[in-house]
Structures are given as C-alpha cells and as structure tokens.
Amino acid sequence: MNEPRLNLPELTVSELSAALKRTIEDAYGYVRVRGELGKVSYHSNGHVYFDLKDERASIAGVIWRSTAQGIRLKLEAGLEVVISGRVTTYPGRSQYQIVVDTLEPAGLGALMALLEERKRRLTAEGLFDAARKQILPHLPAVIGVVTSPTGAVIRDILHRLADRFPRRVLVWPVKVQGEGAAAEIAAAIAGFNALPAQGVPPRPDLLIVARGGGSLEDLWSFNEEIVVRAAAASFIPLISAVGHETDMTLIDFAADKRAPTPSAAAEMAVPVRAELMIDVDSLARRALACWRRNQDARQSELRSAARALPGAEEVLALPRQRLDHAAGRLARALRANAHVHRVDFSRIGGRLSRHLLRAEVERRRERYSGIAQRLRASAAANLAAHRVRTARQGERVGAAVARAKRAIENLMDTRWARCERDAQLLAAVSYRGVLARGFALVRDKAGRPLRAAASVVPGVPIGIEFSDGHVGARVEVVQASTAPRSEPSSRRRRRDRAAGQGNLF
C-alpha cells in the first residue's frame, strides 16, 4: 500500500489552475489548427464560442468581439476552417481552449460544398422556381438600389441611368461584406417593400441589389439564407447584380432577373430615352401618313357618292306637288267635316229630353235609398250582437272574480295558520320561556352570556336578565362548585349496563 507523501507542498485550487495555465501556454503558446466547426454560439456581447473537432477529438474555442468583427464569413456547424491562436485554459470549467486570432476557410472546396448544400435545400423549398419570377416594369418611376453608398457601384448605376433614361433613385446604404452585412441587405429589401405606395418617400417600382466583383468569401453575404429568403419574398421586382459575369451567388437564383454587372442592371431597368423618342417620332409619322391616306380615301368616296345622288330640286319636286294638291283640298275637307259633326250633334240632341233625365234621377234615388235601409238594418243587427257578446263576457269575468276571491281567502287562511304554528314553535324554543319559569340570564359588560363561574372575574360588572326586566350587578366573590358534575343519562345507562350482566346483543 502506497503511503501518502506528506512532504509535498499544499496548493489551493486556484494555484493549481494557474500552474496548469502557465504550463500549457508555455508549451503551446501559438498554434495553427485545421478542423470542422461543431456547435457555434454567437453571444450578445459580440463574442463567438464554438467547438473545433475531427473524427477523434474536440477542443473548445473562443473568438473575442474585436477579432470576430474582422471575420467576413458567417460561421456555421459543418464548415471546415483553419484557425490560428493561443492555447490556454479556462479555470472556471477546468478545460483548455483556443483563443482565435485568425480564422479562414480550409479551402474553396468547403465553401462550395456548403453553397451547394444550401442551394439544394432552398431549391427543394421552391424559392428558385420560375413561376415565382415577376416581369420587370418597362419604365419604372422610382428605382430602389441596395448597395454600399461609397463604392463605385452606385456611381456606375447612376451614370448609366442618366445616359439611358434619368429616373428617381432611392439608395438604401448597406454593408456588402463582413459581419452583419447579410442582415443589413435583407432588412433593406424588406424595408423597401414596407414603404407605402403613395408615401414619402414612395415605394420603388423596381429594386436593384448590387455589389462589385470579389472572391467567394467577399461575396458570401449574398449567399446567406436570410438574404435569399428576403429576395424571394419581395413583391417588388428585383434585379440581382452581384459581382462580375462569372460570379454566381444564391441571390441570383431568387431574384426576378440576374444582371452580369451593376451597369447591365441599370440597362435592364430602363430603356434608352433617345431610342424611345425615335420610335415615338416614327410612330407619329406613320400615324399621320395613315390618317392622311384614310382622309383621301374618304374624300374620294364622298365625291363618288355625291355624283350618284340626285339634286335637291329633283328630290323635292314630287313632295312639293303633293303639298300643293293637299292645300287645295283642305278647305273643302274642313267644311265637310264640320257638317258631319253638326248632323251627329243634332241626332244625339233629339234623343235627350227633360223627362228622360228626371226618370234616371228617380231610379238612382230609389237605388240609393234601398242601400241606406240595408245599411241601417245591418248596423242595428251588429250592435245587438255586440251587446250579447259583451254581456256574456261580463258574466265570465264575474265568475273569474268570484273564484279569485275564494282562492285568496283560502291562501290567507293557510298562511295565517302556518304563522300561528311558527309563533308557537318560536315561543317553545325561546330562552324567555325559561326565564318565565324563574330562571335568570347572566351577561358580561359586552352583553355576552356567561355559562360558567370560572369565566367571571371579581369586581367586574355584570348584567342579569329576568323575565320582566334587567338588573345590573357587580361580582364580589367567585366560588367554584365542588359537587361532581352530573353525567348525562345516556352515559350513566351505558356505564350501569357495563357494570351489570350486559346485553347479549
């Protein structure tokens, strides 16, 4: 059995942790490690914590905020990277970790594999479907541009728009690479879509998301999922102009149109004003020539039709002759018509006489008199029927009143008998009946009944209630009774039964 070495120096936990920290930092002061990122956690204060692993081991790592701001790549689980940093320990958890100074992808192959995996996943969701693409407006009134305000991209777009067709341009300044660039680009696309159509500033009719050329790492912000989803969700038509013609990012698949360069995006956005003016002039000349040819044709047709039509004298000769003949016959026709009407009036007047009118009046008077007699008879009969019905209803009401009176009397008798029984029961259970038999009720100064001598204190005033009034008193002496308390009869019977022979049952 090994004996403990009592001559070893005694260390505290902090001293041992500090010694281990110095040993590890002296032995592995600065290292360069290649591995695959495991769990990645972005802290609210800007620090990044992660696990670096391979097929057999794992080591913790930390990137301080000042270093994390310079890393342009968004760290995700599964990304293969090469890091350089210092190996140290974290005494709070008794573990060793790497404090990162630089971090870079292990190669383009890792980024391309991550890009292809993300592209397959978003394609499966339908974000790149051709059915989602919108048609670009022919001549937008307002164009929104999402890009860096200090780069050459915005100058190229503005210069190209000024050459082709000047339009109002709204620029949403964003970072186009580095930490936070993807979130700013997605927020700019959503912000343009959230503007009111007739507000100030107005909502653009077309969006251009642009950036100059660069490496795959420089353009990685436009491969982020948040940017791709924002472009796919935009209901404003969107042109993607990221990098050069050979560069390809995921936002190009989600956009409604891809431009090889920012200048090409400006060319897609608006037509050439000079060409439009030439086309308009050509159309105007063609329309004028067509109108002149149409007018010449109409004039030729009108002249041909005029030669085929007869003159006004020829057209009006026959109607004028018929009018003259009708005017000559009009006087004779008026006289003949008046004679006919006079004969008809004389014939009708001969049939009318005073006797006929008087007979018609008498016949109408007799008819109206008969109607009046029938009306009076009907009113008398109706009045008699109403009187009989009223008398019958009065008898029914009188009978109902008599029944109601008898019912009320019976109910009152029943209620009065019940009240008398309740009064007798109340008198039987009231303590005043006990007072009437010669007893008295003792109360303290608060009016509460006193039930035992032990609850009375000498010198305290008390009240005594008799059946005919109240008496005030003061306690002088309190003497407890020494007589044994009488037991209830039921308890005495049970005790006597137990002392005797007992009950067989």
Image (tube, rainbow, N blue to C red):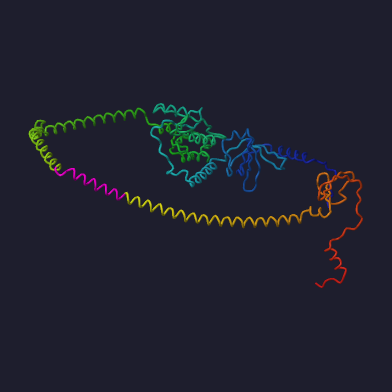
Q: Quadrant of residue 184?
A: top right
On the image, the x and y values in percent for residue 90 come to: 71, 40
In the displayed structure, does residue 76 sit left or right of residue 206? right
Chain part drawn in magenta? 350-371
Quadrant placement of the C terminus: bottom right
Pick the residue in front: 409 or 319: 409
Between 243 and 186, the residue placed more toward the observer is: 186
Residue 504 placement (x, y as % from top left): 82, 73
Query: In percent of the image, x 41 and y 53: which residue is there?
Result: 384
Is 362 included in the stretch rendered in magenta? yes
Q: Is residue 185 left or right of residue 102?
A: left
- Number of labelled discs? 0
In terms of depth relative to the viewer, which is nearer, 202 or 389? 389
Whether the magenta-drawn stretch holds residue 44 is answered as no
Main secondary structure of the magenta stretch = helix
Horizontal side of residue 387 vs 358, given as left or right: right
Q: Position of residue 69 (x, y in %)?
A: 60, 33
170 versus 231 height, above or below? above
